[in-house]
Image (cartoon, grey):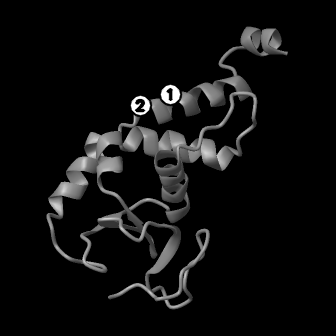
Amino acid sequence: MQPTKRKRTGCESSEAGEPVRSDIWFDYGNLVVQAENLQFRVYKGTPCSSSEVLRAAIYNVGDSKGVEGCPLVFLSDSSVEVAYLFRVIFYRWSYPDDEPLPFDVIAAFLRLGRKYDIKPLYTKAMSRLTVVFPSSVDEYINGQ
C-alpha cells in the first residue's frame, strides 16, 4: 500500500486508515518509519546512531523497497510520540530547562527513551519530571 500523495502536516490521520505522510518527510531520506497510520521518511543513520534498539529494528527489515524505494519499518508506538521523538533527534529540538513542557511530551520522552534505550532523552525527561513532582516533601518545600 502506497502512502497518499498529499503531504500532511502534524499528526493527522486519514479517515480510511491508509498511511499518510507526516510533516517529517525528507525527500532524500532512505527509510520510512510507520507508527499507526502515519509515515515518516527519514535518514536511517540518525535513529541508528541514537539507539541500538532502533538500529536492530531497522536492520532487521533489510533493504526491502517498501515505500518510494525505501525500506519500511513499523513501530507499535503512538504516531504522536514518534513525532515528538523524531523532532528531537532530527531537528535537534532542545527545551531550555526553565521552559515548561506539556506532560504528554515528557511522558513520551520517558516511554520512548526507556523503550529504545535513548539514555539522554530519558534522563532529561526524568529530571524535568522530578522538578515538577519531587520525590519527597523536603525537596518540594526547598524547591519553592
Task: Please tell me which residue is depicted at 26% across the width and 41% down the height of the picture.
Answer: 52
Task: Please tell me which residue is depicted at 48% across the width and 57% down the height of the picture.
Answer: 82
Q: How many marks?
A: 2
- Give 74 or 69, whichever is nearer the viewer: 69
Task: Please tell me which residue is depicted at 47% across the width and 88% down the height of the picture.
Answer: 5
Would you place residue 35 above or below residue 137 in this image?
A: below
Q: Amino acid at mark 1?
A: Thr
Q: Which residue position is annotated with label 2? A: 119
Question: Residue 42 at x, y = what percent?
Answer: 38, 61
Q: Residue furthest front?
A: 28
**Is 63 displayed left or right of 105 in the figure?**
left
- Give 89 or 120, whichever is nearer the viewer: 89
Residue 124 quadrant: top right
- Give 69 or 104, whichever is nearer the viewer: 69
Mark 1, Cα crowd under 10 Å, few <14 / some 14-19 / many 20+, is some
Q: Which residue position is annotated with label 1? A: 123
Would you place residue 79 above or below residue 15 in this image?
A: above
**Is 80 displayed left or right of 3 in the figure?**
right
Question: Residue 110 at x, y = what percent?
Answer: 51, 39
Judging from the image, what secondary structure is the residue with disc 1 in? Answer: helix
Task: Please tell me which residue is depicted at 36% across the width and 43% down the height of the picture.
Answer: 116
Question: Residue 106 at x, y = what percent?
Answer: 61, 41
Would you place residue 52 above or below residue 84 in this image?
A: above
Instruction: Name the quadrant of the C terminus.
Output: top right
Q: Dots 2 and 1: beta carbons under 8 Å? A: yes
Q: Amino acid at mark 2?
A: Lys
Instruction: Name the quadrant of the N terminus.
Output: bottom left
Task: State how far apart marks 2 and 1 are (Cα).
Answer: 6 Å
